[in-house]
Amino acid sequence: MSFERVNVFIIHTPFQHLIVNHMLTTLPEFRNSDNYLVLDMNPDSINVVRSNWKRVIALNPPVGSSVIGSGKSCRRALKEIDSIINEYPKVSLFVSDIDWPLNNAVYGFINKTHDRNIKICNYPDGIGSLLVQKPDTKRKLRNVVKSFIGLLGGSPYYIYGCDIMGIEISDIIYSLMPAVITGKTDKKIVNIPKLSLEKSDMNQNGCIFIGQYFKNIMSDEKYRNMCVKAAEYTLNLGYSDLFYKPHHFANSQIESEVFLGYGFNLVSDYRPIEEIFQTQQMKCTVSYISSALLHLKMMFGEDVRCISILGVTALKDLYVKAKMIDDMQDLFKICGVEIHAE
């Protein structure tokens, strides 16, 4: 049996996989639709519940995070996605970040080749989904370069005139914290129910540091020094059971070497921390600017302590504007995340 409406979800991280499955099981609008999952990632890093989907499409190879060298795989993915949406009179395309190469290519392709109404739906992808941030001059120039690379054989890249994540050009926005973005856009916002616990198993002595990958934006020396400060701060919080979970996109061993050197236990579980915490929780979570700090506070409130350390340092190296840094810190404070002074 097929329905008139199709929802096509494109994901490229384990957290996105967690969220879209949660949306499918908690929001009624997906029950009378055909739902397709497009994996722009290694499928071995997640446990796909295939019964949730009419079809799961694992791109081989994935398009990935760069327009360079991904042109063939991106064009193959576009043909596959186009063949799906052509079968349905009503189409909703779910993307988390319009700047991600495949998401961008699909958006541009739809604008150029389809004159019927295809709804673009934005779903959560970390802090960027809560802060409507405009691209600066450097990013705009980089996007122009991406579009030229697409013309030369890389992934097609569409220059879009809106915020970085594409919230302003989305028809519908699905959010875990709609109150935060209400007033920043006139688009329809759908509240995603909070993630619920499968069981409560709180380690009162447990503290976990959630890694992030900053190697490409700062020198190795500066990156190592930042990791040392973060590890020492977390160690001195006084929790006896210390854990470290690297980021799934980590492209350097610097952070791992530092935290393991300080005696932290490595968490090699590929699942996002929000999913791990559904069955096994720790009293304290520390990170730089990870959106997990916000998500865990939404899930557990005062039962979990969440701390952001060296966030301003990281954001400045990411060339984030001063106002956006202030907005992000305000968001942390509203949610109850502690901010460690730089």
Image (spheres, grey):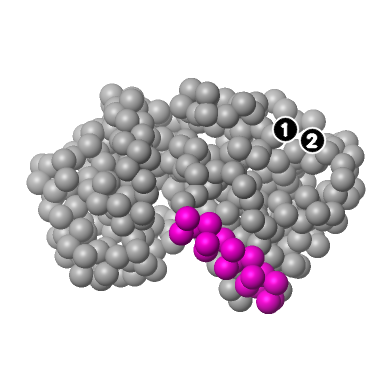
Q: Quadrant of residue 19?
A: top right
Q: Position of residue 161 (x, y in %)?
A: 62, 47
Dot 2 falls on a residue whose secondary structure is: loop
Majority SS type along the magenta span = helix
Task: Give the number of callouts.
Answer: 2
Relative to 286, residue 336 above or below: above
Q: Position of residue 280 (x, y in %)?
A: 36, 39
Q: What quarter of the picture does the N terminus occupy? A: top right
Q: What quarter of the picture does the C terminus occupy? A: top left
214 falls in the magenta region: no
Magenta extent = 137-155
Residue that carries the numbered disc 1 in the rendered image? 30
Q: CA separation, marks 1 and 2?
A: 5 Å
Q: Is 20 or 92 nearer to us in this picture?
A: 92
Question: Label 2 sits on what residue type?
Answer: Ser
Q: Is 257 or 266 nearer to us in this picture?
A: 257
Q: Is 165 or 65 nearer to us in this picture?
A: 165
Q: Position of residue 120 (x, y in %)?
A: 70, 41
**Residue, x 24% and y 57% (percent of image)?**
265
**Residue, x 57% and y 25% (percent of image)?**
191
Dot 1 falls on a residue whose secondary structure is: helix
On the question of residue 142 being in view, the answer is: yes
144 falls in the magenta region: yes
Residue that carries the numbered disc 2 in the rendered image? 33
Question: Label 1 sits on what residue type?
Answer: Phe
Label 1 neighbourhood size at 10 Å, few (<14), some (14-19), many (20+)?
A: some
In the image: residue 155, left or right of residue 322: right
Q: Quadrant of residue 256?
A: bottom left
